[in-house]
């Protein structure tokens, strides 16, 4: 057994306990001069430095003097796997075209689908791997990752296969999501019901059959739908999610990014794990979410990336008693951001979270958003040893500063990765 005693942390944020609902958000459980004992890939003990140094005198040591230590950041909504870029579309938006206009004219998601389908798996893997390294360097130890730039069974499964491969390679841990319902496939333009049928009757059953051969040790992936004008309407979304649920897939849902189609209430009704985006969300939707176990995932990089004024009504979600997490939404169209530190900084300014609330939303609550709260998201005995050491003594710098990288060292499954 390998052990490691991290000691003398200026601040040790354990985030101990369950995911934090409503007003409870922000319970970071901070210890000054704290220590963590790691045994293999697990946390074995957490406490004051003097106590742990005395109890484990022979454990190899790592001093975190002058550093804040907290659980590894978790990014519970990413579109990590794609090829190419959309810099030209960004410039078109600056000149006045909207995201939806570009999408309706055949650009947007469709242009990345074309680039991704034709990239070849080595190029796709290399480009995606570079992003996983960017996330990890910035302190993200686990990320959800969606397929969705294939929109055709074989290329969706090929993307899923690459995500599984990158997860095996590590060190970034990847929790996969199947998003064939990201847009209407180019072959089905003008026939959204037919593409919806194809997903329900062909793709989802095929994924279910494919899974045990390709990821025998892993739970089924999430199934997600982009419920939006120009993508899937509420009836189509309900059909896809119901079909997925019957096959045993856990659910996620993109809702209210540009228009309110009622997706947030549907997510709550179907007991989806998360409802994400939530910008045009109504009071009734917020109440439905807050009364459910569905985690509301705010993605502040998206309106920032689109230079839009409206953000997720996070304070209303919390006031209603909802469970809130934050994520990057990294994708080539709206938000190419590899840093959860930047997401925290934005969340404090645009969602009006406190630094402690943003950190909880990016750790224990983000773990709940990928159904991993029993294994990840806090520093407690028995949990996986995923933590970050900051180059600063006060965790609030994660929110206060922005645009840089305050991560000094990442520890993933007990293994130390100095920056
Ligand atoms: O979450 N909303 C759908 N998907 C992405 C955008 C994807 C793209 O433009 O390529 C999002 O914002
Ligand atoms: Fe998204």
Image (cartoon, helix red, strand yellow):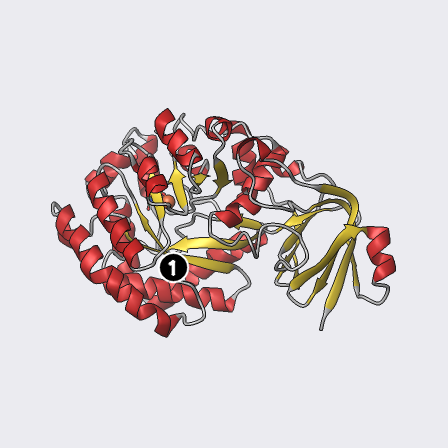
Q: Is residue 411 left or right of residue 283?
A: right
Q: Is residue 28 left or right of residue 291?
A: right
Q: Nearer the viewer, residue 126 or 349?
A: 349
- On-image quarter of the C terminus: bottom right
Q: Is residue 194 left or right of residue 218?
A: left
Q: Position of residue 312 (x, y in %)?
A: 43, 31
Q: Residue at x 44, y 34 (%)?
A: 290
Look at the picture and state if 400 lies above or below 58.
above
Ligand 2 falls in which quarter?
top left
Residue 169 at least partly seen? yes
Q: Position of residue 299 (x, y in %)?
A: 44, 38
Q: Is residue 276 left or right of residue 3?
A: left
Q: Residue at x 57, y 30 (%)?
A: 23
Quarter of the image holding residue 108? top left
Instruction: Bin the neighbour count of mark 1 within 10 Å (Cα to Cα): few under 14, some 14-19, many 20 and up.
Output: many
- On-image quarter of the N terminus: bottom right
Q: Secondary structure at mark 1?
A: loop
Q: Nearer the viewer, residue 195 or 158?
A: 195
Q: Nearer the viewer, residue 333 or 94?
A: 333
Q: Position of residue 329 (x, y in %)?
A: 42, 44
Look at the picture and state if 264 lies above or below 388.
above
Quarter of the image holding residue 60? bottom right
Q: Which residue is mark 1?
A: 221
Q: Residue at x 20, y 62 (%)?
A: 202
Q: Position of residue 116 (x, y in %)?
A: 30, 58
């Amino acid at each position: 057994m390998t052990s490691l005693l991290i000691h003398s942390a200026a601040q040790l944020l354990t985030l101990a306990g369950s995911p934090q609902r409503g007003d409870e958000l922000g319970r970071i459980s901070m210890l000054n001069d704290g220590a963590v004992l790691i045994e293999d890939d697990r946390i074995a003990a957490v406490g004051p430095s003097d106590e742990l140094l005395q109890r484990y005198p022979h454990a190899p040591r790592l001093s975190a003097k002058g550093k804040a230590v907290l659980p590894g950041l978790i990014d519970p909504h990413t579109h990590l796997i794609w090829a190419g870029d959309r810099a030209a579309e960004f410039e078109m938006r600056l000149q006045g075209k909207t995201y939806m206009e570009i999408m309706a004219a055949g650009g947007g998601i469709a242009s990345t689908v074309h680039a991704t389908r034709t990239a070849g798996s080595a190029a796709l893997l290399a480009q995606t791997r570079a992003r996983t390294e960017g996330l990890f360097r910035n302190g993200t130890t686990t990320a959800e990752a969606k397929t969705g730039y294939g929109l055709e069974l074989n290329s969706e499964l090929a993307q899923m296969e690459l995500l599984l491969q990158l997860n095996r390679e590590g060190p970034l841990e990847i929790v996969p999501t199947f998003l064939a319902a990201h847009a209407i496939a180019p072959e089905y333009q003008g026939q959204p019901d037919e593409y919806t049928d194809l997903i329900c009757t062909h793709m989802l059953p095929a994924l279910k059959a494919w899974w045990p051969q390709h990821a025998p040790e892993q739970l089924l992936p999430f199934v997600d739908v982009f419920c939006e004008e120009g993508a899937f309407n509420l009836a189509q979304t309900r059909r896809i999610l119901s079909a997925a649920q019957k096959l045993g897939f856990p659910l996620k849902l993109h809702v209210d990014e540009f228009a309110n189609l009622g997706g947030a209430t549907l997510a709550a009704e179907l007991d989806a794990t998360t409802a994400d985006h939530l910008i045009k969300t109504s009071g009734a939707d917020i109440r439905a979410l807050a009364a459910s176990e569905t985690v509301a995932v705010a993605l502040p990089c998206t309106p920032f990336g689109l230079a839009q004024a409206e953000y997720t009504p996070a304070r209303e979600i919390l006031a209603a008693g909802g469970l809130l997490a934050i994520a990057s939404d990294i994708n080539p169209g709206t938000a190419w951001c590899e840093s959860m530190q930047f997401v925290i900084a934005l969340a404090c300014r645009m969602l009006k979270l406190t630094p402690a609330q943003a950190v909880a939303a990016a750790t224990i609550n983000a773990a709940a958003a990928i159904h991993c709260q029993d294994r990840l998201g806090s520093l407690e005995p028995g949990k996986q040893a995923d933590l970050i050491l900051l180059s600063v003594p006060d965790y609030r710098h994660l929110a206060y500063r922005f645009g840089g990288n305050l991560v000094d060292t990442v520890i993933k499954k007990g293994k130390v990765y100095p920056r």
